[in-house]
Image (cartoon, rainbow, N blue to C red):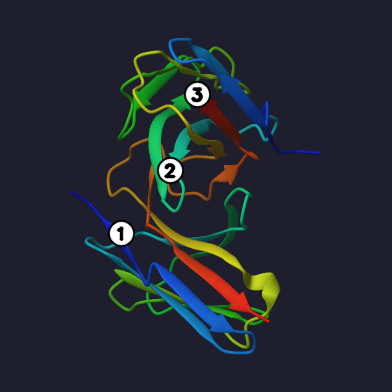
Amino acid sequence: DGGITQSPKYLFRKEGQNVTLSCEQNLNHDAMYWYRQDPGQGLRLIYYSQIVNDFQKGDIAEGYSVSREKKESFPLTVTSAQKNPTAFYLCASSTGWGYEQYFGPGTRLTVT
Amino acid sequence: GQQVMQIPQYQHVQEGEDFTTYCNSSTTLSNIQWYKQRPGGHPVFLIQLVKSGEVKKQKRLTFQFGEAKKNSSLHITATQTTDVGTYFCAGPMIYNQGGKLIFGQGTELSVKP
């Protein structure tokens, strides 16, 4: 089946630790995105990538880092510099500019 | 900067009542997309409108794109409990920025049986 997978579904970490969230897609999409969603809030863009080995900061990139070494994969690292990391993280992909985005099931990160 | 505003933020209806959410952009959009996110789930693409004045229907859902391509609406006729969730509209940035979409804040729909 084609789609986007994110793992794990739930993740718990202690404050001060870096954590990497996985995002894999087999849709052959060029563009991939990371969003953060807080309770009752909309989607805020963290990072996006148009093509392998290239990515740009979104609206709230501070405290996050990404890599795009393979077309299928776009992992997100939440660093200890992110002041409020507890949130629902969504990965998405699309064929390109202006096209619909397909979202993964998300990872709920809790940092205590 | 380019913004997409969505109203209302919340809507509570009795099952069987109609529901409408409105989306307004600060700039002309090449297209408007609608997504639905069920409670605890992830956004799922519903539809894309491209043409000025376009109207599309999906069963009880009617989507409209304004003549000026700056506003859109989603209307649900005779809501059911399965309609519960948050509905987002989204439009592409006017400059090529990796397919970046600007999402509205969403309208959360609750349906009382």
Label 2: state its secondary structure: loop
Q: Position of residue A105 (x, y in %)?
A: 65, 40
| Type of amino acid at the residue the image marks with label 2 | Trp
- Marks 1/2: CA–CA distance: 17 Å
Answer with left or right where residue A52 lies relative to residue B5: right
Q: Quadrant of residue A102?
A: top right
Residue B1 against residue A19 in the figure, above or below: below
What label does residue A97 carry, if any?
2
Q: Chain of mark 3?
A: A
- Marks 2/3: CA–CA distance: 34 Å
Total count of labels:
3
In front: label 3 or label 1: 3
Please identify the quadrant where the C terminus of chain B is shown.
bottom right
Q: Nearer the viewer, residue A54 or A103?
A: A103
Which of the two labelled residues, at mark 2 and mark 3, occupies the earlier sequence position? 2
Q: Which residue does the numbered mark 3 point to in the structure image?
A: A111
| Type of amino acid at the residue the image marks with label 1 | Val
Marks 1 and 2: same chain?
no
What label does residue B4 carry, if any?
1
Answer with left or right where residue B101 lies relative to residue A93: left
Q: Nearer the viewer, residue B11 or A53?
A: B11
Answer with left or right where residue B51 lies relative to residue A91: left
- Determine whether label 3 and label 1 are within 8 Å by CB: no
Label 1: state its secondary structure: strand
